[in-house]
Amino acid sequence: MLSSPSSRRSTCFLGPAVLAVGSLACAQTLVQRPASKAGPPADKPVPVSPISANTILPQGTSLQVEINRNYPMRAGEAIEALLMHPVFVAGRLAVPANTPLRGRVISLEPDTKTRWHGRLRGDFTPFHKVQVQFNQLILPSGPLDIAATPAANGAPVLLLSAPGVKPKQSFIAREWEQAKGQVHDRIAYFTDPGVGDRALQLLYHQLPYHPERINAHTSWSFELNAPLDLPEIPTGIRVPATLTNAKCDLQIWSVHGVLGAGLTSARAKPGDTVEALVVEPVFDCDKQLVVPQDSTLIGKVSVAKPAKSFGRNGKLRFTFQQVRFPDGFNRPVEGALAGAATEKTQNLSLDAEGKITPRNQASAIAPLLLTMLAGRALDQDGNLTLQTGVASNAFGLVGRIVGLALGNRNIAAGIGFYAAGLSFYDNFLHSGRDVVLPKDTRIEIETTPMRAPILKPDEQ
């Protein structure tokens, strides 16, 4: 039975909206843990290093910044970002988080991979990657010029947080929980703040060409090219109460560090060494230093599975067994990943055991819907113009214009089946995604000190 003309016209615009909403991925946040109650220190504290009058950030200090609004993607654009994490010097807070930095877009580089992906789907926007140079640190005392490396690794950030341990579930229960999460994410697309901007971007991506922008919450990592002399820090309490990062009742240290080298599930092997530089000192509940800044966490990869065909994603897990203090002493620990700042487009998830995997984005709805729309062009009983528009609308505005202009059922159906084939390939045949953690990835590790004496290097 044929539908009414009004219902057919609505179908022309329903397809792209359903596909866009169906492709949304859920995000996670790194939740701040509540402060623990005070209690006795579990181990002998490490002496605090003496602090000079002048606070100097050494050359090579890694900084991570994030913008909180959208910026036009053009060379010369001035950008202001906020420091994502505090910077410590000799165990003292030198630059707090959310300190502003100023920079400028210095170049636009072609993003070849994204360009070809778009052109195969009717989007001919000349996508670019931006390179940003940050040159000022805005302190309460005034702007301070810095010498830093150009930052070209900008990407929206996803803050992962390991959930609590959940009871073992059956396969059906896990699938049902995942389905509920997907429904919640799709509802949030329309109810969360910023729905107007998301609708505008949805419209833009139906066009064969649309303006580019640097999205809010894009972050960059870069290093100082030269030492930075900071204004003198007022004397006083060595560490604020908010920086106490030990769970006294459980004897757990929460350690913040950065990876010393890149890590990916595509090349990592179980047993490979993993090192992370501690960038924030760890204090117990009595404000005693237990893990100094610039210590090194040493561990190994325990699970590494590369991505495979048919959408099978990679997996990665690593643990830490030792902490090396700056003075050369080593101490055995038991540590697992509890949080990480990763690129949002990877859409990673972190389980309670510290295993990282990309979320499964495959959907059977999109290919089926596109196939149904493409088949409408072959229906000989309906309106030719309407049916060719319906069949070709999955290929964006370009496909819709071509389908309507030619008025040929076979060409319109061909465009529609081509789009359905691409969707089927992306969802089921394309190789899965690997876990990629670049150098200087910010991580959080929960460690438990083992009951063993501290060893000197020559005693091992």
Image (tube, rainbow, N blue to C red):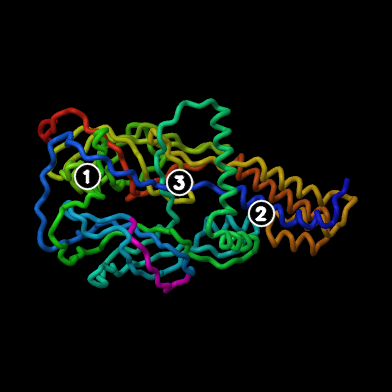
Q: Which residues are magenta?
A: 74-84
Residue 173 placement (x, y as % from top left) = 55, 29
Q: Amino acid at mark 1?
A: Val
Where residue 140 sits, quadrant-wise, is: bottom left
Q: Earlier in the sequence, mark 2 or mark 3?
A: 2
Q: Residues within 10 Å of mark 3 (few under 14, many from 20)?
A: some
Q: Earlier in the sequence, mark 1 or mark 2?
A: 2
Q: Residue at x 13, y 57 (%)?
A: 236
Q: Which residue is mark 2?
A: 17
Pick the quarter of the image with the C terminus. Answer: top left
How far is the residue under mark 2 from the one under mark 3?
A: 24 Å
Q: Residue at x 25, y 63 (%)?
A: 225
Q: Amino acid at mark 3?
A: Gln
Which of 70/361 is in front? 70
Q: Residue at x 56, y 50 (%)?
A: 188
Taking the image as shown, residue 61 lies to the left or right of residue 215, namely left
Task: Using the image, determine if residue 264 lies above or below residue 238.
Answer: above
Residue 251 placement (x, y as % from top left) = 24, 34
Task: Using the image, determine if residue 334 lies above or below residue 125.
Answer: above
Where residue 320 sits, quadrant-wise, is: top left
Taking the image as shown, residue 264 lies to the left or right of residue 137, namely right
Taking the image as shown, residue 313 lies to the left or right of residue 36, namely right
Which of 54/418 is in front? 54
Residue 441 placement (x, y as % from top left) = 35, 49
Element at badge 1? strand
How far is the residue under mark 3 from the one under mark 1?
A: 25 Å
Residue 49 on the magenta segment: no
Q: Which residue is mark 1?
A: 282
Q: Residue furthest bottom?
A: 76
